[in-house]
Structure formats: structure tokens, C-alpha cells
Image: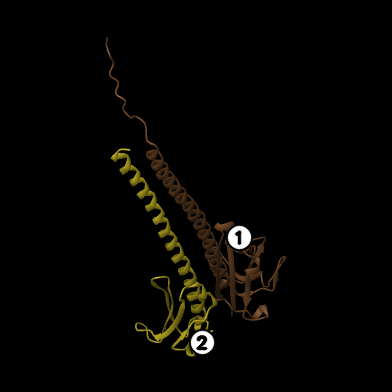
Chain colours: A yellow, B brown
Amino acid sequence: MSIVEVIVSILLIVILFSLLVMEYRVLLISKSQKYQNIAYHVANKEMEDLRSTVLSGLQASGTISDPLLSQLPSGDGNYTVDDSADYSGLKELTVTVTWNDGVSKSVVLKTLASSAGLNSQ
Amino acid sequence: MKFLNHSFKNKGFTLIEVAVVSIILLMVIGFLGFLSVKHFWIYNSQINELSAENDVRLSLDDVDNYVRQSYRVASSHDMYSTGAQILVLQIPSIDSSNQIIDSTYDYAAFYLQGDKLIRQIFADSSSSRTDLTRILASGVDSSNFSFTYDNADYSLVKEVTTSITVTQGFSNYQRSVTVSSKSYLRNYY
């Protein structure tokens, strides 16, 4: 077996192993996307709840309790209701869902609410 | 007399060389086999995972989209009656300019047919919507699929929560995604 044959063989094995590592990377990214999808739906549900609450009845902040959070590693969620800095009379609703799959990640949804909009229902 | 001088050079492989090469060859084949199996597993499981996620996301977005447009949750329409696994929505009809036509309604029914989630539109003759039946998701787990309402009286329902589990693939490659979503009837008045 010549040195050229050895080098070519090692090169092939390295390339194949790199492909496997890349596939595992794709696996992790896919899992991350799954968590993001769940987090988005949790945040969206909370936002729908806030939008259906009378504006004067909105709490300044709160935590989210959703069974879907248990599907997220270290899943947690909260919301805040602040006066809008840009538009007087409007409230800025911010819903944040966080999780940690080795790296801390979050989905944040924001919207403005007024007493003349959906929140007046 | 001429004597030929033969040199007896060893032109073959020794037993040790053959054994070592065979062992290396087996290791390489084993490694390539391992890579192939892993590649096959990752490819199939990921295809199933992405397919399940896609179906869940599209179907929930579709249900939410129609719930938000709706005027009421109808107790029934055509052959469909609202319940835990069937949702019938009464939606204001729209003209070709997307303007609401007063006192005219289209209906949308969401129901399971086997493991498929179906959306069927029953449009009023004056509506710009058309009668349409569409498969939103396949591989829906009927025991983990439900519509829940904020009021037992469907005419008073303002909020619909949809829970869905979609399973794709089989054996070790099977992947399930469970998500729920909630939306409010924006045209309830």
C-alpha cells in the first residue's frame, strides 16, 4: 500500500465523517426549529388572551402557564403590559417565551392595544 | 553449460500483511456501514419530523385564520355538527372587493376524515368565496385532536382552542408533533 493510497483512504474517511457531523448539526437545528414553533404557538395563545382582555383589566405583568411549555427544555414564559412610548393612550403588550437547549433562546411577540380596538370587547 | 541465475524474490504477501490489511478493511467497511445506517436514520426521521411540523403549523394557521374571520361558531351546517372534533364556522360573506355582504354568510367546516384534517367551505351564491374542500394535514392522531370552546352554547363562543398531534413515518423513523393554538372570533358582535 503506497503513501498515496493511504492518504486518499484517510481523506475519504474524513469526508464521510464530516458528512455525519454535518447531519447531526442539521438534527440539532431541526430540533431548535421544533422548539421555536412550540414557543411561537405558546406566545401566540397568550397574546390572543391578552387581546381579548379589556384594556383596563390588563395586569402590568404575569407569567404564562401552558402545558406546551413542558415540551420545551427549561421552558418559561411571561408577559408585560407597558404604556406605549410612541403613542399615548396605547399599551404595548410583550409576550416572551424562553427555553434553553444548550443555548438560551426566546420568542418575543409585541403588539399595541387600545381601548378602541379588540381589547374593548 | 549455461546456468540460469534465478533470484527467488518474495512477490506475494505474508500472512501477517494479509491479516492486518483484512482487519483494516473490515474496520473501514464497518465504519462506512455505520455512517450509511446513521445517514439513513437521520434522513428519514428528519423528513418525517419536518413533514409533521409543516402539517401542524399549516393546519393551525388555517383554523386560526378562519376563526378570526368568523361571526359565530355554528352548531351545524350541511352534514356537520360542531363538537369536540368538528368545528363549523359562520363567516361573513365577502364580495369581489373583499367587502362584507350584510346578513350573508359562508360556512367553513373542519373535521377529521380518517387521519386527515379537512377544511370544507360552503359559500353563499353571492360570495366571492368558492366551495372548496382541502386536506390540511395527514397523519392526525384522532385521540389527540380536539376543538375546545369557551362556552357550551356555541352561539356564545368567542374563543376556539385547537389541539393537534400529527405523526409521520413508522418504526424508528416515526416522529410526532403536538401543538395547540387559540384564536378569538374577531367578527363576533
Number of on-image labels: 2
Amino acid under label 2? Val
Quarter of the image for residue B183 reads bottom right
Residue B25, horizontal then vertical, whole percent: 41, 43
Look at the picture and state if B43 lies above or below B100: above
Residue B155 is at least partly visible in this image = yes
Residue found 44% across the figure and 47% down from its top:
B32
Amino acid under label 1? Gly
Q: CA distance from mark 2 to mark 1?
A: 39 Å
Among all residues in the image, which is located at the extreme bottom? A56
Quarter of the image for residue B11 reads top left
Residue B104 is at least partly visible in this image = no
Look at the picture and state if B131 lies above or below B104: above
Circle on res. A54? 2
Chain of the residue where label 2 is placed in the rendered structure: A
Few, some or many C-alpha atoms within 10 Å of disc 2 (few <14, some 14-19, many ≥20)?
Answer: some
Look at the picture and state if A56 lies above or below B91: below
Q: Do the residues indicated by labels 2 and 1 lie within the same chain of the protein?
A: no
Residue found 67% across the figure and 78% down from its top:
B154
Circle nearer the viewer, 2 or 1: 1
Q: Quadrant of the C terminus of chain B?
A: bottom right
Residue found 49% across the figure and 57% down from its top:
B46
Among all residues in the image, which is located at the extreme front? B1
State the residue in front, B34 or A50. B34
Residue found 44% across the figure and 51% down from its top:
B35
Among all residues in the image, which is located at the extreme right? B79
Residue B130, horizontal then vertical, whole percent: 61, 60
Residue B157, horizontal then vertical, whole percent: 63, 79
Residue B66, horizontal then vertical, whole percent: 57, 69
Q: Which residue is labeled 1 in the image?
A: B139
